[in-house]
Amino acid sequence: MPEQTASELVVVANRLPVQRNGGQWETSPGGLVSALLPILQRERGVWVGWPGSGDAPEGAFEHDGFTNVPVELSASEIDDYYEGFSNSSLWPLYHDACQPPRFHRRWWHSYVAVNKRFAEAACSVASEGARILVQDYHLQLVPGMIRELRPDVRIGFFLHIPFPPTELFSQLPWRRQIVEGLLGADVVGFQTRRGAQNFMRLVTRFTDHRAQGSRVKVGTRAVQARAFPISIDTARFERLCADPAIIARSRDIRREAGEGRSIFLGVDRLDYTKGIDIRLRSLQELLSSGKRTIHDTVLIQVSVPSREFVTEYVELRSRVEELVGQINGQFGEVGSAPVHYLRRNLPIEELVAHYMAADVMLVTPLRDGMNLVAKEYVACRPDNTGVLVLSEFTGAANELDRAVLVNPHDIDGMAAAFAEAASMPRDEQSRRMRSMRSRVRRRTVYDWADEFVGALDEPRQKTLTGVLA
């Protein structure tokens, strides 16, 4: 175990960016880790987070050029802080309350205690004047707690999920405490401008602080609230698309799905926010209308298991699998099914092969902060073919406006959009896809990291302009 020294850059997230594989630590996949890894390695930074397993070292350990600082959680804290307040109170509330959020004081007390532990761990490894980057909804009290302990540091907070409007957030019994916690940061980042605007309205309503434009005066500080839309490692996906083995696999998928059939693809975590059940009902409506048949249409639905012992997720899985059975039973023939359902996580190479094979990508969540699957599909269409059907309630819809945008609550409207996408002329596909590919290439996950960290590096006095006047 290395000696724990103070660092000028500290990332604080619910999970560490490493995982066990055969007894060895390896860096976890994912856009956030990829984006922050070069900065952490360059500055010998520190990542503070829960290791997610009982066999983690007791103290800090080195891996891949940066230091990991584990924050341990007890079984009751996993139940109350993580499964309870984070994922049964905040998660549904921030996603338009598409499932009723539940509020329990025991969960809140655990959330406060765990946030304090994360804050103390971050402060213990931060050098004088360090930058501390706090990530996501699990840790919204951490910025304020760090501010009290270490007024010398610069604090950035980024929310990866949507931030709700006043009428939803107001349901939260601890609404003021959450807002005040976020205001401990110097920069509060959101996926969209609307999220930042929602936050500013809540500051005005639930605190005594003075807000002007995108800044809030908090004592002698000014807090910025801005949009930093996250993206993907575009170059990585483009390299994978050029891999001969992946190209061959994409051809195999097309052959296995059935020659002459338009392949619809859905790739989602099995979560009630993703609208998988409504998507299936829309496909059922499309096939019932006769506008498409199993001879010209097939859906491959990849559903990654999630929170499998939580009641709402168990019910969703049952609902989805029942719909798959209904559709295949109603429209299937011997040797041909309209829906191929894969309840598993696909390796990145297999995922890219599916993106390349799909004629139509269905991304129809009820609410999503960004949704990187939409951007991954676009990055994996080097020939500029394919159609993206995208929920207008995703952050990605602000950038990928040449997609076929849909209201994911509208079964008839989605069925019509599916038919439009499947029959779209090749030249129109090309015009739309070229535009979207240009946007995805122009702004990558590395640009997001540079902008977010860059905003934190702005001189303090500059952020006060127009607020303290």
Image: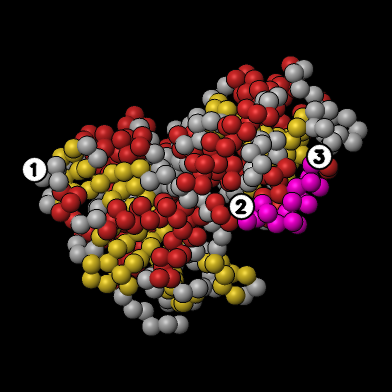
Q: Is residue 111 visible?
A: no
- Amino acid type at mark 3: Ala
Question: Dots 2 and 3: beta carbons under 8 Å?
Answer: no
Tag on residue 469?
1
The residue shown at (59%, 42%) is 378
How far separated are the C-alphas under marks 3 and 1?
Answer: 64 Å
Circles 2 and 1, Cβ within 8 Å, touching? The answer is no
Q: Of helix, strand and loop, which one carries label 1? A: loop
Extreme residue in the top direction: 289
Q: Position of residue 158 (x, y in %)?
A: 37, 50
Nearest to the observer: residue 11 or residue 150: 11
Residue 426 vertical position relative to residue 461 in the rendered view, above or below: above
Question: Residue drawn at (54%, 56%), measured in percent from left and top?
Answer: 30
When the figure is inspected, residue 100 is found, relative to residue 218, above or below; the finding is above
Bounds of the magenta segment: 239-254
Residue at 57 percent across and 70 percent down: it is 26
Tell which of 445 and 138 is nearer to you.
445
**SS class of the residue under badge 3?**
helix
Image coordinates of residue 104 in percent, x first then y, are 39, 44
Please state which amino acid type lies under the numbered disc 2: Glu
Q: Position of residue 213 (x, y in %)?
A: 22, 37
Residue wearing tag 3: 257
Q: Amino acid at mark 1?
A: Ala
Residue 341 left/right relative to 137: right
Q: Earlier in the sequence, mark 2 or mark 3?
A: 2
The scheme the figure's colours follow is secondary structure
Q: Residues within 10 Å of mark 1 (few under 14, many from 20)?
A: few
Q: Earlier in the sequence, mark 2 or mark 1?
A: 2
Residue lying farthest right? 334
Residue 300 x/y as whole percent:
73, 39
Question: Is 244 within the magenta?
Answer: yes
Q: Residue furthest left?
A: 469
